[in-house]
Every structure is written in C-alpha cells, then in structure tokens.
C-alpha cells in the first residue's frame, strides 16, 4: 500500500510544477552544457579539422604528429605505467584496510578509519611539499638512515616513483570509502552462513566477499584511474621533467609552448584512452541508482 | 463536530485503479476503521481525505462542503502518520505549536493550548524534550497531540501504532478511543489489524482491492461476514467445501438442510462455535495438532477429505494428535461464489 | 564450528588493527609532522636528527610578504564567489531534482556525472581552449568559471540526496498543520536537510580554496591563489620554511572541515555520490 503512495506527491497542477522544475534546473544544466559538453565537442572539432583557404577540412594532422613524436609517446607510456602501478598498489593497500574496517569492531578500527580518510583533507600541494621534505634529498628518510649508519637510498623525488607515491597517498581515502561502502552490502549473515558451512577465511574472501563487491571494486579502480591518468599537481611537482606525465605535458604545451591545438589533441587522446573507465563508471552509477 | 461524505471516490496510479468508486458516510463523532490487507487502498483513501492525493474521480465533502480540490493546509482535517513524522529539529512544544503559530495565536494562547493537549495525551511537562529523546509510544502521542491541538473537524489516523509493540499498541488504542469519545471528534482510522479495528471502531469498513467489501458494526461484521473474504480476514473462519442437492448437504458429517438451489457451496463456522468431543466410534475427524493458548485450547483437525479446520477444545480433556473426534459446528453460515447466502441453514437433526 | 578467521576481532589483542594503525600512522602522519616541525624551525642542518634551533622567525618572514597576503585574499574571494554562485545555481536545482517531477529529470540528473567521467585535467584543457578564444585566460572570472566545473557535481548530487532523505511525511504533516508549500520548505525541509547542505557548501568552499590545477592552468602566473603560490615556492626552491609555514597556515581551514563534515563523509551517502 505504501509503495503506491510514495510515488505521487501532492500535485496541484502537474504541468505547472513540471515547468517550474525545468526552470530551476535550467541554469546548472546550461552551465554543464557550456562548461563540459561544448568544450568536448569543440575539442573534437578543433583537433580534427584544419582551416585552409577552402574553409574547414577534415584532417588528422595533429594526431599524426602526436603519434609520430617519440617524446609524446614516451610521455604517454610513462602515464600508462604510473596509472597501472598506482592502481595495483591502491588495490593491494586499500582492500585489506577496507576488509579490516568492515569486519572489525575494535576501538582501533575507528582510528584506522580516521587515518585512511585523513588524506582527503590534505590538499595535494601540501602533500607534495610534505613528501619532498620527507623523501626528498636530505629529507627525513635520509636523516634517519644516516643516523642509523645506513647508506642513503636513491630518493624517489623527481623520478617516476615520486608521483606514484603521492598519487597512491592521495587516492587512499576515496578507494577505501568506496570499498567499505561495497563491503557494507555483504551481510553478516551471508558471511556467518558460509563460515557455518566450513569456509576458511581464504574461501570466504574468494567465494563470498569478492563476488559481492566486485562491482564496487571496479568502480573504485575506474574512478582512481580517471583521476590518476590526467593528474597534474603531484607529477608536476614530484615527477621527472622528462619524460613527463600527460597532465604536466598538456599544461606545458598549452601555456609554455602556447600550442593550444596540440594541448587539446593530447586532451582528446586522454579522453579516448579513459573512455572505457568513464563509461564503466557512469554505467555502474546508473545501475546502482536503478536498483534503489 | 463534522460529517464526512465520500461519493464515488476513485484513484488510479498509472492506469491501475487503487481505489474504486468508494462511497462512505461518516457521521458526527463516529470512529470508523478502514480495514484491509496491504494494497487494499485504505491509506490512499485516507490520504485523499487529507488532501495529499488528488482523486481521479468522485468527491469528498466535509459538512456538505466539497473539499476535493482544497490543498491540505486549508482542509479541516488532522492527520497522524504511521511514522509519526515529528519534526526532529524542533522540541515537543515547537512541534505542537507549529500549526498554532501559523494561525497567529498569541503566545499565551499557544502555551495554554499546547499544555492542555499535552495533558490530554498524558505527556504534561514534556514540552522541552527533544523528539528523539522520547520512546516510540511517546512520539506517537506527540503526533496525536500535534493534530488534536488544531481542533480538526476530522481526525485521520494512518496505522498510527503499526511500529509499536503489542502491549503499547493495546494501551495506546484504548487511550485514543477515550480521547476520541471525550472530544467527540469524527475519526477515520486505517489499520490492517483486525484486533485494532474490533477494539476501536463504531463501524468497520473492510476493503479489498480498492473497493468496499462490507461496512458494519464490529459485532455484526464478525457474526455475519458478508463475503468469504471478510470471513477469513476477521478472525478465523473454517470453510468446508460441499455441495447441495435438493436442499441437503452432500457431506455426511455436516448434514445440513437448507433451502438453496443445487450446486457447490462452502459451510463456514468459527472455531469457538465448533463443538468437539472424542469420538465414540470412527468419528469424522482426526486431531492433527493441539495448541494451548492458556485462555483456550486450539485443535487443528483433519476431515476425511483432508480439509483442515480449527476448533476450540475443552481444557478438561487430554487431547492428543491422532485422536479421532466428532465435530458439531454451530452458528453455521453458507457461502456460494464467495458471497453469504442469506438463508439460515439448520442442522439436519433440527430439520428432522 | 569455531568462528575464528583472522578478520574477526578476537577477545585478545587485535594484531591486524595494530599493524594497520602503526603503518598508516607512519605513512599518513609522519610527512605532515615533518612539515609542522619545519614551520617552527629556524635552523635544521643535515644530518642532525632534530632542528638546531626552533623559533617563529619564519612566521614573521612569511606573514610580512605581500604576495602571501595577496594570495590569501584572492583565494578567499575566489572561494566565496564560487561557493555563493554554485549554491545559488545548484541548490534550487537540487531541490527540483529531488522533489519535482518534470520531463527528463532522471537523464538530466545523471548528466552531471559527465564531470566525473572524463579525466579532469584533459577536461580543463578543453575548457581552457574555449576560454582562450573568449579572453578569459588569466582573469578572475575565468578562474571562477573553471572552478564551477569542479563544484557542479558535488553541489547537485549531495544536496539532491539530502533533500530526498527528508521524510515526505514530515512535509505532509506540516501541510496538514496549515503551512503552505513555501513555508513547509523553509520550516521543515531546509532545517532537516540543513546539516548535509551545510557540509556540501563547506566542502565546496574548501575544495575551491585548495584547487590547484584549474587555478594554475587559467590563472598562473598572473593570478596567484594560495596553492599556486605554494607551487611557485616549491619550484623556486626558496627558503624551505616559507612552504612549511604556508602549509600549516592552510591547514587550519582544512581541519575545520574535517570536524564539521565528519557526518557527511562518514555516511555512506557520500560514497553513493560516487556511484557505489
């Protein structure tokens, strides 16, 4: 009975309310169109056409120059490498934390959760600065190694590992949050029933828990990949100057080299590469809303 | 003091008729229960009276005035919701005073009215409590007070006690009945619990699939359910299929004589009106299960053809599963095609 | 059957928890502590374990720099403008999405996902391409607009969830008590959704304050917001303490959010906003 009731609010005049609703959402939707949709379409048009004497003609020249330039390809490869390493590390670090948070009731779990979410409130510039002071040359790690009479380790600062460390640090909170939310859908009863049937922890994880959170896991990874692939601040500050990740590369092409068309070409290439992840992310959000 | 009239009230959601042409007249000071299973349309009817749903057809009149198109804030109705819907950001006093403030009463008036109504629902002195500091029963009392303080012509209660436990529910419904009778307020009460309806109502409206199945006083409803559905919904009713030929039942164990046309029918009788005694010979039923409810013993009995019926057994007899018994129903009703046959059946013995 | 897998808390010591707590403490907290130490350090020569002398000298030095104050005021002005604009634009729309029925409602709401479904910096480059032709590069309003790209999704989805979480019966009870639709919104819906809305507004403010990428791309080097100034300090290898003092200084607003928005972040609705 109640299900029939909730669907229909008080309606004085359905049409009038419908019009009011449309008017209210008009502004943000318009902004969305102007700031997201239009730039993307514009980027496609700009990079795929060439202005000649005969007017606009279709041309792949900017893509051809990107894919024939070894420097660009190196940057792209570095970006792939960084993203993949970060994704694996995030999974290895965050899944155990999320599992612990889901199944522990101890007083420590509140502390662990607070720490895992903490980086959400650390702006990436401050993080970058903190990592330089800790892992950089003559940083805390060097000081400690020296005090212990151990040889210096090569610093990850200004190597590809610098951005990796920073990006993983930065992405821990959302990944943990998404995984814990996914694990929240695994009922205690399901786990207890499996345990009752004789499942060991390994079986529990493989056959009961993982199948139920696989979607949350993939969404969390897709979300992280989307963020990492075109990250800017951390690779710009912590990473090597050459090869560089796509984020700093695009920025440099746009602002320093003043080649906006090339920069936009690079942007479209990142769109294309991330399209799978973006589509997956959108699809699963839509699906989870339909279930509700 | 008001009179509520529903005529041809209809509501459809997406082509599905949830309420089908309901006619109902509630007189001044009467308490009427809308009783039915989930999906029977009872809450929808109440929400249409409150103004929260716009009827697809028909009219709602209060004291003869058509309010069908009047928005809820201008209707003389007060609604109490199942989830109590108290405003958790206000304290008890503010919850009750909200409607009075909208009516621009003076602060002194508001204070005295709120205190009076809190007294009425037994929560004097609770005004400064936060809503979440109250128990479920207290919250529901505040919700009732919030509606009563505005002196509505019609009080609407939508399963107000559904989320409370059994004992509290019984106590609160007695209190609601007392308050309602003291104030003489016309009240419509939606419930799916037959106990609640029987305990509270002057009249009960039984709904099924959005249509009225029967409207009657509780006692009449229980004794002479107009349809098989009502019979089964209010209390337990044993229904034994049979057929009649030349005015006689074809079941030997229930040899009834009644003046009906030939054809199938169902014999109906209440467990408490079913006499059972240990069989002298073969008997015609087998005890399947004995349940002791303290106040009475219920026996589940299997008839020859497998039909299971319930009967109240005497506590002085040691009943046991498997025991053979004889059954003698009293106050028997007959249903054909789900509808009560008006003719009174007599037992064959009485007819003879 | 004995319930004893590793993931369960045992009656005795929670070794897994201790392990995570220690590791996370080191990884998460130590870098930040190092920064805090640097902020109050006057001399710290390698390879000493601790600074040779502590003091507030560099606070004075940092706070007497005009560019720091300019950046702070610019960042505050920018954040306030962006927050005000996005609240003005998004909150009524969020209410409409949550409570009204209009054609295309679901599709339009989902379309805001687009801001999350593209690699962020690539999107910003595409937007910057448009701004270039509009002359918005290196202008205050250009930076404001690019920040809106970041805040749109947050300021729509979280408030929509907040409004939807308000029990409709509460609103109906208020109508029943004689309140008109506007009064119901003002007296019931808004206070009920208030804490989540407040958290969303606060997060928008803080996110904008710390946003680096759009500000760097559109604003730098003409418009120096606080994060842009930080990057300039880091790149130019200026006195180490400047960065440390700025970090500690910037930390204050961030910590306030940590306290205020715990409810929002802790609740699962936040993760739901990201699609889980």
Image (cartoon, helix red, strand yellow):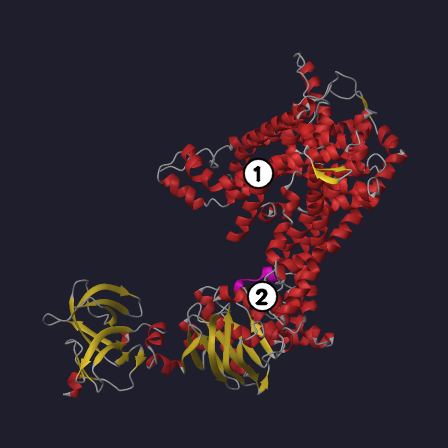
Q: Mark 1 points at which residue?
A: A276
Task: Provide the residue designation for mark 2.
Answer: C169
Q: Is residue A78 left or right of residue B49?
A: right
Subunit of label 2? C
Answer left or right for C253 relative to B245. right
The quadrant of the picture occupied by the N terminus of chain B is bottom right
Residue A216 in the image: above or below residue C194: above
Q: Which span of residues is magenta-colored? A: B130-136
Q: Residue at x 24, y 78 (%)?
A: B265
- Element type where label 2 sits in the image: helix
**Left or right for B11, reference C96:** left
Query: Quarter of the image holding residue A141?
Result: top right
A155 or B280, nearer to the observer: A155
Front-lying residue, B279 or A253: A253
- State the SS at label 1: helix
Residue at 69% over, 15% down: A147
Q: Does the magenta stretch include residue B194?
A: no
The answer to whether residue B134 is magenta is yes
Q: Which residue is drawn at 10% across and 70% down?
A: B282
Above or below, A134 relative to B186 = above
Q: Do labels 2 and 1 share a chain?
A: no
Residue B295 in the image: state x and y as whole percent: 31, 70
* Position in image of residue B242 (x %, y %): 21, 75
Residue B56 position within the rendered picture, expressed as x and y whole percent measured from the top left? 53, 75
Taking the image as drawn, is residue A101 in sight? no
């Amino acid at each position: 009975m109640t299900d029939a009731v909730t669907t229909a609010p008080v309606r004085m005049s359905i049409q009038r309310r419908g019009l009011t609703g449309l008017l209210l959402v008009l502004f943000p939707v318009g902004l969305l169109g102007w700031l997201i949709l239009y730039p993307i379409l514009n980027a496609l048009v700009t990079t795929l056409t060439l202005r000649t004497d005969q007017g606009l003609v279709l041309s792949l020249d900017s893509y051809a120059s990107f894919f024939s330039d070894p420097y660009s390809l190196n940057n792209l490869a570095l970006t792939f490498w960084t993203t993949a390493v970060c994704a694996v590390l995030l999974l290895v670090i965050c899944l155990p934390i999320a599992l612990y948070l889901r199944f522990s009731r101890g007083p420590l779990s509140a502390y662990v959760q607070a720490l895992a979410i903490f980086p959400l409130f650390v702006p990436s510039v401050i993080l970058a600065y903190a990592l330089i002071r800790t892992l950089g040359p003559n940083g805390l790690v060097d000081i400690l190694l020296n005090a212990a009479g151990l040889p210096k380790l090569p610093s990850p600062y200004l190597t590809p590992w610098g951005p990796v460390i920073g990006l993983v640090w930065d992405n821990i909170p959302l990944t943990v949050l998404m995984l814990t939310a996914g694990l929240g859908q695994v009922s205690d009863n399901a786990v207890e029933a499996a345990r009752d049937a004789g499942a060991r922890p390994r079986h529990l994880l493989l056959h009961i828990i993982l199948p139920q959170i696989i979607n949350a896991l993939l969404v969390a990874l897709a979300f992280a990949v989307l963020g990492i692939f075109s990250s800017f601040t951390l690779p710009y500050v912590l990473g090597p100057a050459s090869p560089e990740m796509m984020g700093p590369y695009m920025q440099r092409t746009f602002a320093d080299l003043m080649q906006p068309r090339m920069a936009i070409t690079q942007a479209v290439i990142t769109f294309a590469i991330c399209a799978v992840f973006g589509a997956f992310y959108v699809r699963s959000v839509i699906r989870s809303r339909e279930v509700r | 003091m008001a009179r509520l009239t529903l005529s041809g009230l209809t509501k459809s959601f997406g082509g599905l008729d949830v309420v089908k042409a309901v006619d109902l007249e509630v007189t001044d000071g009467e308490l009427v229960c809308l009783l039915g299973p989930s999906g029977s349309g009872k809450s929808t009817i109440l929400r249409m009276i409150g103004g929260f749903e716009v009827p697809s057809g028909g009219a709602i009149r209060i004291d003869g005035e058509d309010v069908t198109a009047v928005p809820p804030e201008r209707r003389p109705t007060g609604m109490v919701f199942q989830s109590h819907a108290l405003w958790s950001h206000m304290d008890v006093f503010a919850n009750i005073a909200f409607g009075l403030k909208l009516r621009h009463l003076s602060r002194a008036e508001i204070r005295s009215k709120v205190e009076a109504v809190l007294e009425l629902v037994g929560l004097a002195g609770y005004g400064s409590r936060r809503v979440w500091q109250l128990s479920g029963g207290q919250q529901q009392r505040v919700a009732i007070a919030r509606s009563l303080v505005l002196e509505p012509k019609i009080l609407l209660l939508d399963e107000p006690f559904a989320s409370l436990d059994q004992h509290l529910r019984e106590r609160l419904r007695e209190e609601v009945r007392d308050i309602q009778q003291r104030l003489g307020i016309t009240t419509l009460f939606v419930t799916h619990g037959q106990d609640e309806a029987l305990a509270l109502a002057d009249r009960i409206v039984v709904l099924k699939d959005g249509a009225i199945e029967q409207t009657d006083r509780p006692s009449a409803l229980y004794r002479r359910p107009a349809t098989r559905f009502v019979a089964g919904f209010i209390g337990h009713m044993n229904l034994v299929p049979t057929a009649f030929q030349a005015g006689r039942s074809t079941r030997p164990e229930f040899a009834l004589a009644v003046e009906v046309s030939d054809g199938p029918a169902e014999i109906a009788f209440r467990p408490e009106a079913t006499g059972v005694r240990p069989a002298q010979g073969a008997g015609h039923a087998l005890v399947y299960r004995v349940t002791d409810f303290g106040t009475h013993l219920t026996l589940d009995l299997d008839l020859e053809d497998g039909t299971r019926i319930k009967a109240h057994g005497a506590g002085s007899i040691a009943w046991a599963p498997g025991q053979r018994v004889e059954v003698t129903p009293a106050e028997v009703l007959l249903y054909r095609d789900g509808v009560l046959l008006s003719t009174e059946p007599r037992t064959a013995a009485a007819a003879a | 059957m004995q319930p004893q897998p590793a993931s369960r808390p045992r009656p005795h010591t929670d070794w897994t928890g201790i392990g995570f707590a220690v590791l996370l403490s080191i990884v998460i907290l130590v870098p930040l502590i190092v920064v805090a130490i640097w902020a109050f350090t006057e001399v710290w020569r390698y390879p000493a374990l601790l600074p040779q002398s502590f003091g507030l000298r560099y606070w004075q030095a940092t706070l007497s720099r005009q560019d720091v104050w300019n950046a702070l005021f610019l960042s505050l002005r920018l954040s306030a403008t962006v927050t005000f604009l996005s609240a003005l634009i998004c909150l009524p729309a969020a209410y409409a999405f949550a409570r009204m029925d209009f054609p295309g409602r679901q599709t339009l709401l989902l379309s805001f996902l687009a801001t999350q479904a593209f690699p962020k910096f690539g999107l910003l480059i595409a937007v910057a391409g448009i701004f270039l032709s509009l002359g918005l590069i290196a202008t205050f309003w250009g930076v404001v607009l690019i920040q809106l790209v970041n805040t749109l999704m947050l300021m729509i989805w979280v408030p929509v969830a907040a409004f939807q979480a308000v029990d409709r019966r509460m609103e109906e009870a208020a109508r029943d008590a004689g309140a008109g639709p506007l009064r119901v919104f003002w007296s019931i819906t808004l206070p009920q959704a208030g804490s989540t809305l407040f958290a969303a507004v606060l997060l928008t403010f803080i996110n904008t304050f710390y946003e680096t990428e759009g500000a760097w791309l559109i604003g730098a080097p003409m418009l120096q917001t606080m994060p842009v100034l930080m990057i300039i300090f880091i790149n130019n290898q200026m006195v180490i303490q400047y960065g440390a003092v700025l970090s500690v200084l910037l930390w204050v607003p961030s910590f306030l959010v940590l306290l205020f928005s715990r409810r929002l972040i802790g609740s699962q609705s936040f993760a739901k906003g990201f699609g889980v």
